[in-house]
Image: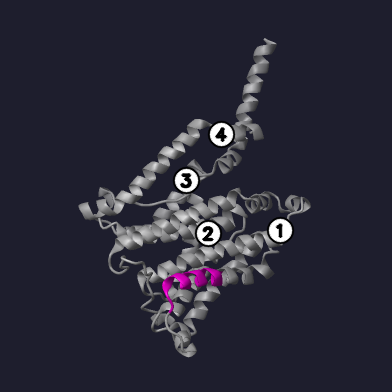
Amino acid sequence: MSVEEIVTVHERPEGRERRIVVGIAIIATVVALPFLDTLFRLNLGTKLIPIGVFIVLALGLNVVVGFAGLLDLGYAAFFAIGAYTAAFLTSPSSEMLRALGAQPMDFWPAMVISTAVAATFGVILGAPTLRLRGDYLAIVTLGFGEIVPLVIRNTPQWTRGVQGMNPIGTPTVPGVQFGLATEPWYFLVVAIVVLSVVLTSRLRDSRIGRAWAAIREDEVAAASMGINPVSTKLFAFAMGASFSGFAGSVWSSYIQFIDPGQFDFSVSIFVLVMIILGGMGFASIDLLKNADVSRSRSLILGLALVVLMVLRPEGLFPSARRKMELHAAEESEEEAAQQRATLYETQR
């Protein structure tokens, strides 16, 4: 497909109108959902809040994997760094605060510091390793993802090891009580998800986003055009890590207890699968009401991944550019067939 056709697709009025209608419907559903939950006693709040946190994680990892084309298998490590940083700064049982003789910090500045600390660790990890490519980079990030939980587990004097840390500071908003009620947490997580979507969308369409896309498609060609691959990839790594630390601080404050077991390798894989599938969710149906679905979660997830890769390899909600790239070969074959048919009719 030519550049003119791509531009035409993005500028179609019906496409913009459809996005506006879908956006309004989503906003109305999001706002009404807590009230419907209370009215019909669906108890969805405790499920939707973790889903929102993992959406933020997926958006951050998408910057690294989707925008820049870097395979990160240790993303849960930054999630743990953000969660434990928030716990160190806000928990009354923090040994670090006791050693410094300081009082627990408010949640909001602690969240900002957690985001910055995670981004810093992203730079520390990325600076010596982002010259690697492909499988080698994946192995290095996998090692980092395994090291962080081990360090947390083996430093009980600071992290309390496998016993975990609790309680952890909660957000303070005038007139709003963050406690057992799920509504304040729900709207906070929704605001965080919206902010993350806006930021990642702006990054994708910015100059640095185009540089990431160029490196993802052909790093050698991008470097020949004046793009510094190392600094550009390092910024992507830092941005992805900052989203993970951001989500980690909210997660630790919401569940009020963190331990190293919450940040193992499966978390990184699950978030990566979320990106590949383009978002997913499983609903309870009559056939599965009496079954223990939690034990078959990996099986269901694996089957969904295989089926989707066969039937819709671009994901459930792909970008227009990625969809065109994946189906370019099919369109070329169709165009060639049409040209052959036209030539045949002409020769007749």
Q: Between disc 1 and disc 3, whose residue precedes?
A: 1
> Rounded to the nearest whole Å, what is the CA distance between mark 1 and mark 4?
31 Å
Q: Quick one: label 1 or label 4, which is nearer the N terminus?
A: 4
Quarter of the picture holding the C terminus? top right
Q: Does the magenta portion include 111?
A: yes
Q: Position of residue 339 (x, y in %)?
A: 66, 22
In the rendering, at what x and y percent does residue 96 appear? 47, 85
Q: Amino acid at mark 1?
A: Pro
Residue placed under numbered mark 2 in the picture:
60
**Looking at the picture, which amino acid does disc 2 mark?**
Gly
**Residue drawn at (49%, 34%) of the image:** 15
Q: Residue tagged by mark 1?
A: 229
| Residue under pointer 4 | 11
Q: Quadrant of the N terminus?
A: top right
Q: Which badge, 3 or 4, comes first in the chain's sequence?
A: 4
Helix, strand or loop at label 1? It is helix
Magenta stretch, main secondary structure, is helix
Asked whether 163 or 79 is in front, the reply is: 79
Q: Residue furthest right?
A: 224
Residue 309's x, y, as percent?
A: 50, 46
Tag 3, which secondary structure?
helix
Q: How many marks?
A: 4
Number of other residues with Cα within 10 Å of mark 1, as a class: few under 14, some 14 to 19, many 20 or more: many
Queried whether the magenta region covers residue 345, the answer comes back as no
- Would you place residue 110 above or below residue 293 in this image? below
Q: Which residue is mark 3?
A: 308
CB within 8 Å, label 1 to label 3: no
Q: Residue at the location (68% across, 50% down)? A: 214
Does any portion of residue 325 appear in the rendered image?
yes
Marks 1/3: CA–CA distance: 32 Å
The chosen color scheme is one colour
